Amino acid sequence: MIEKKDIKIEICLEDADSVIAAEKGGANRVELCSDLFEGGTTPSLGMLLTAKAHTSIPINAMVRPRGGDFCYSEVEFETMLRDVQLFKENGANAIVFGILTPEGEIDVERSKKIIEAARPLPVTFHRAIDMTKDLNKSLEILISLGVERVLTSGGEPTVMEGILKLKELVEQAGDRIVVMPGCGITEKNFEYLASVVGAKEYHVFLPKEYESKMTYRPGTIYMGGMLRQPEFLINHTDAQRVKTIIEIKG
């Protein structure tokens, strides 16, 4: 059983200010995304470079060209390969991706190409695995591909719902791949989750809402679609919440 002090915490975030906050709170590394409302998409190269200029924390870069499913067109896949190359050339510490076939299986051939393009950087296969037919089979495929880490909620909407499957996957993986639980981890459930699942690493989103600095606020204009977030509330990672999680693990 892994000791709590050896557990690593990865913070999921979507802006350079949040990377600074995550480092301040004591996180081990971050996963840099854009548009977490969509579950995370590819961040801009400028965002990566700015975050690196202000921090020394390891930054894993998400490569996901859009929200929605994980079955991509040829043009979208070409975009992913280009983003992998750009992130590798500009100091990303790892690449995060996920590609599926229409049948709900790991897309082995395309995954091989992404991994080859990313090397020598390590790769994480994200929660696309939770959308596959058979998590145990998918885990073995990722191991055979040489993937270093897989992010999963155990095939359920949240880690607490998938807690028993997560424990099973951690045991199945052994030392062959890191199974990293994520989605729905908080300061309240982290200690219990870690004691049951026994994973080495955890993926945590710890935001805080900040009031917009805008004093002029037209109430009839929106930048998003019909399903929209509040226009004048800004989310950034909360350094204190990160620190609390780090203190819990010891």
Image (cartoon, rainbow, N blue to C red):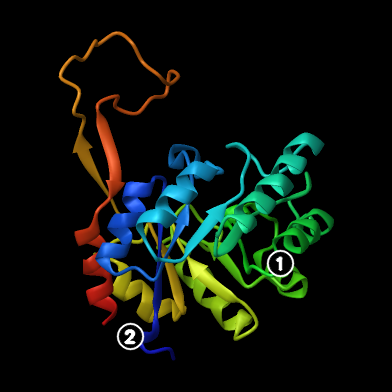
Q: Residue at x 28, y 56 (%)?
A: 21
Number of the label disc, if any, that sits on residue 170:
none
Disc 1 on helix, strand or loop? loop
* Vertical relation: 100 (above or below) 160: above
In front: 214, or 104? 214
Q: Residue at x 78, y 48 (%)?
A: 101
Q: Which residue is mark 1?
A: 119
Q: Position of residue 131 (x, y in %)?
A: 63, 52
Look at label 2 and name its amino acid: Lys
Q: Residue at x 70, y 61 (%)?
A: 118
Q: Which residue is mark 2?
A: 5
Relative to 22, 62 lies left or right: right
Relative to 116, 208 lies left or right: left
Q: Position of residue 227 (x, y in %)?
A: 42, 24
> CA separation, marks 2 and 1?
30 Å
Q: The N terminus appears in which quarter of the rendering?
A: bottom left
Look at label 1 and name its amino acid: Arg
* Vertical relation: 20 (above or below) 209: below
* Vertical relation: 64 (above or below) 107: above
The answer to whether residue 129 is seen in the rendering is no
Q: The C terminus appears in which quarter of the rendering?
A: bottom left
